[in-house]
Amino acid sequence: MFIILGNSLRITLFSKVILKIEASDSFTIIYIIIGILGFVLGNIAYRRNIYQSILNFLAAFSIPILVGAFMLNAFSNRIAFPHSLKLGDCTNSVLRYSFETARGHGYFLTLYVPKSQSMLASTNTISSFKFTGNLRISTGGNQLVDMALDSDRAWLTDSSYVLTGLGSNNTNSPPLDNYMRSHNNYDLEIILNPPPPSGSSMWMSWKESKMDK
């Protein structure tokens, strides 16, 4: 009975450790792994009386491991993952959306249409849907910006128009990071003339890393 009880306690403890590891960030996981390795090596050294060999091994490899762990953590904190949120379908020329921004940076607005590009005989790419309009961003009843939009300023892909600034890919319009921050509520009013074709939708996209707050 004591053996069964002991095994049950070990399984419960092991499960709690696994849950703790899954909930930890990368740097914490690395420390846990190093601690487990140290515990295992310590037991081996105790049973085989080879403390000096273990100490020499740890002295030779502990500093590179810690430096590597620090660099890995710093690198992982800067990795940014893309996210997108569908604001809604485009059913007329005036579109209004209210939402709270998620944690992240590099926000940009994209209009998805059935087809956004046409190829000319000269292989130049042109817009298959010509439009002009405005983007108004407000928060708490205060208007932050009234930005001009048009198909010539947008960055074209096969099925979308990136309406706002996106680094070197679209410098014709200012980036939304100039006006929007994480975890804030915003109201968007988008006016497009003529209205987008049937089947179009509006999306908000951004990037998220561990360094974002």
Image (cartoon, rainbow, N blue to C red):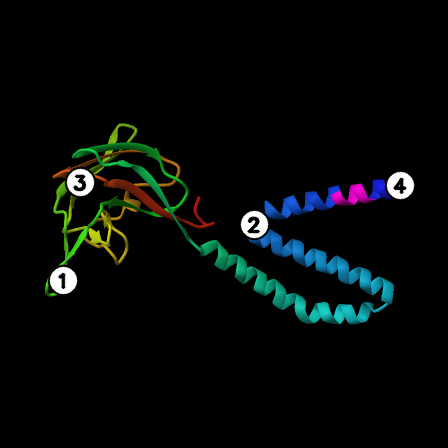
Q: What residue appears at the point 84 percent right and 43 percent down from the top-left corner?
A: 6
Say which amino acid is labelled 3.
Pro
Q: Earlier in the sequence, mark 2 or mark 1?
A: 2
Q: Residue at the right extreme? A: 1
* 118 and 76: which is toward the camera: 118
Q: Residues within 10 Å of mark 1 (few under 14, many from 20)?
A: few
Q: Tell me the kind of residue under disc 4.
A: Phe
Of the numbered discs 2 and 4, the one sitting upstream in the chain is: 4
Do the residues under discs 4 and 3 have CB atoms within 8 angstroms? no
Residue beneath label 2, please? 25
Q: Nearer the viewer, residue 105 or 169?
A: 169
Q: Determine whether the residue tagged by mark 1 lies in a helix, strand or loop.
A: loop
Evaluate if marks 2 and 4 touch, with contact meaning CB atoms under 8 Å apart.
no
Cα–Cα gap, marks 2 and 4: 37 Å
**Count of numbered circles in the view:** 4
Residue at image point 29% right, 42% down: 203
Q: Earlier in the sequence, mark 3 or mark 2?
A: 2
Q: Residue furthest top?
A: 141
Q: Is residue 60 above or below residue 118?
A: below
Q: Secondary structure at mark 3?
A: loop
Magenta region:
7-11
Q: Closer to the camera, 195 or 95?
A: 195
Q: Which residue is mark 1?
A: 124
The mark found on residue 2 in the picture is 4
- On the image, the x and y values in percent for residue 162 come to 24, 49
Residue type, numbered disc 1: Asn
**Distance from Cα at disc 4 to Cα at disc 1:** 79 Å
Q: Residue at x 68, y 46 (%)?
A: 17
